[in-house]
Image: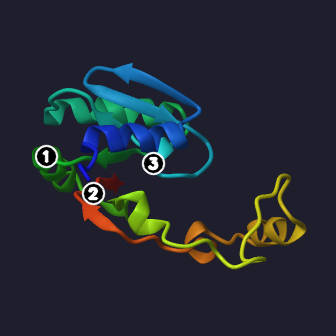
Amino acid sequence: MTLPSLETLYNVIEGTWPPSAKQALGPWAIRLDDSGSSRVSAATAQAPVTDADIPLAENAMRAAGQTPLFMLRAGEGALDDMLAARGYVTKDITNVYAAPIATVATRRPPPVTSFEVWPPLAAQEEIWAAGGSAEDVWPSWTARCIPKPRYWGA
């Protein structure tokens, strides 16, 4: 199997859970979303960034009522250093996995293991209403790990 490129995987991730709005601002893609999800509320560099560009993204996110948050992708070590020098810390790390489907889907789950339902079951709504997070509810998937993006939050 030939693994997809990181750029392809970044696009897949964004396509499966897009932000409410996205705008280009200088070298940045500013994502705006009030869901509370890091990935859909993070700015990403679309061109080379200097330290002087960081306030542009910070101010745009604050103006939208968001806390400044940056998603760093593979090869953005200089941006990583600039954000660290400004006091940003790692908030969430997104692991990106890829594997041949034949490796992952080796057998069907037993009956009554999972259900495809919409609208959500009452039990699902109770969990979500109680504030259960994805980490509490959804299983972790493992396969072949490739370089992962990093999120920085102030």
Give the spatial CA distance, label 3 vs label 1: 18 Å
Coloration mode: rainbow
Q: Residues within 10 Å of mark 2 (few under 14, many from 20)?
A: some
Q: What residue is shown with label 3?
A: 39
The residue at the point 50 percent across, 31 percent down is: 63
Q: Residue 100: horizontal and vertical position, in percent?
A: 36, 58
Q: Position of residue 54 (x, y in %)?
A: 25, 36
Instruction: Determine crowd level at label 1: few under 14, some 14-19, many 20+ residues with C-alpha closer than 10 A.
Output: few
Furthest-left residue in view?
78
Compared to residue 98, the image places residue 138 above or below, namely: below
Circle 3 packing at 10 Å, graded few (<14), some (14-19), many (20+), is many
Q: Secondary structure at mark 2?
A: loop
Q: CA distance from mark 2 to mark 3?
A: 13 Å
Up-down relation of residue 10 to residue 52 (above or below): below
Between 71 and 140, the residue placed more toward the observer is 140
Amino acid bearing label 3: Arg
* Quadrant of residue 46 within the rendered picture: top left
Q: Which mark is residue 114?
A: none
* Picture disc at residue 75: 1
Q: Amino acid at mark 2?
A: Lys
When the figure is inspected, residue 38 is found, relative to residue 23, above or below; the finding is below
Q: Is residue 149 above or below residue 135?
A: above
Quadrant in the picture for residue 146: bottom left
Q: Judge from the rendering whether residue 123 lies leftward or rightward of residue 67; answer left or right.
A: right
Secondary structure, mark 3, is helix
Disc 2: which residue: 148
Residue type marked 1: Gly
